[in-house]
Image (spheres, helix red, strand yellow):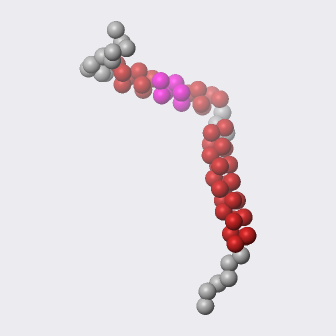
Amino acid sequence: MTEIINLKNVRKQKARADKDKAAEANRIKHGTPTALRRLEDGRKTQAEQRISGHRLEKDADDN
């Protein structure tokens, strides 16, 4: 025999799960201290500069 499911409760559980996922993403995005964000941005910039410095062909923009 099958189990009876209350659709209202299922919808509420799904909404809570979606809300929890969004909250976790926001905690990651906004929860890092400014110093760590700046450090990460600096590392990204440095990595991009290294990669662009090793290019063999120049872009049309780089006259």
Q: Quadrant of residue 27?
A: top right
Q: Is residue 52 left or right of residue 57?
A: right
Residue at 58%, 26% in the rendered image? 38
Residue at 33%, 17% in the rendered image? 59
Q: Give the image location of residue 12, x and y in percent.
A: 72, 64
Residue at 34%, 8% in the rendered image? 63
Residue at 45%, 23% in the rendered image? 46
Residue positioned most to the front: 7
Q: Quadrant of residue 41?
A: top right
Q: Quadrant of residue 18?
A: bottom right
User: Where does the N terminus fall, quadrant-wise?
Assistant: bottom right
The part of the chain drawn in magenta is: 40-45
When the figure is inspected, residue 11 is found, relative to residue 35, above or below; the finding is below
When the figure is inspected, residue 60 is found, relative to residue 16, above or below; the finding is above
Q: Give the image location of residue 6, x and y in percent.
A: 71, 76
Residue 41 magenta: yes
Magenta span: helix, strand or loop, mainly?
helix
Q: Nearer the viewer, residue 26 or 14?
A: 14
Q: Nearer the viewer, residue 10 or 44?
A: 10
Q: Give the image location of residue 44, x and y in percent.
A: 48, 28
Q: Give the image location of residue 49, x and y in percent.
A: 41, 21
Q: Is residue 54 left or right of residue 7?
A: left
